[in-house]
Image: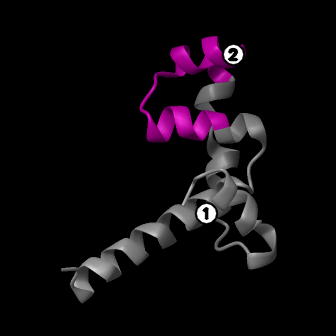
Amino acid sequence: MMTTTHCRSICSAKSLRLAFVAALQRLTPMQRATVILRDVLGWTAKEVSVLLECSSGAVTSLRRARARLAEGPVGADTVDLAEVDRAGLL
């Protein structure tokens, strides 16, 4: 039997995933890949630079990407919820 606490945890996890996807949409594709590989998966700058075929300096300079993520919440109009759902991200 699912308790209220379980339901809140599930809703919270879905909200967190949606917020993460919405935030990532603010980044360029290169910034998005770099943030995911470095900050989420823990890859080294060298590993990311080899995969993305760019310099290690470009990879370690995540200031712009992090600044965009720190700008605050994105509006609901920025996120295509149907696309997010089709991609299986929720």
Query: Residue 79 bears which disc, if any?
Result: none
Residue 41 place in picture, x, y as percent: 44, 34
Residue 81 place in picture, x, y as percent: 71, 68
**Residue drawn at point x = 68 percent, y = 19 percent:** 52
Classify residue 79 as left or right of residue 22: right
Residue 67 placement: quadrant: bottom right
**Which numbered disc flags the more N-terminal residue, 1 or 2?**
2
**Residue drawn at point x = 52 percent, y = 15 percent:** 47
**Residue drawn at point x = 67 percent, y = 67 percent:** 71
Magenta stretch secondary structure, dominant: helix
Q: How many marks?
A: 2
Characterize the local packing of mark 1: few (<14), some (14-19) or many (20 or more) Cα atoms within 10 angstroms. Answer: few
Residue 57 place in picture, x, y as percent: 65, 22
* Magenta region: 33-57
User: Label 1, label 2: how many angstroms apart (C-alpha)?
Assistant: 24 Å
**Residue drawn at point x = 62 percent, y = 57 percent:** 21
Q: Say above or below: 51 vs 34.
A: above
Let me know if residue 41 is in the magenta part: yes
The residue lying furthest to the front in this view is 1
Q: Which residue is mark 1?
A: 70
Q: Say above or below: 31 vs 53.
A: below
The residue lying furthest to the left in this view is 1
Q: Quadrant of the C terminus?
A: bottom right
Secondary element under disc 1, as helix, strand or loop, is helix
Q: Say above or below: 88 vs 52.
A: below
Classify residue 16 as left or right of residue 77: left
Q: Amino acid at mark 2?
A: Ser
Residue 4 place in picture, x, y as percent: 26, 88
Secondary element under disc 2, as helix, strand or loop, is loop
Query: Residue 55 bears which disc, if any?
Result: 2
Characterize the local packing of mark 2: few (<14), some (14-19) or many (20 or more) Cα atoms within 10 angstroms. Answer: few
Q: Amino acid at mark 1?
A: Ala
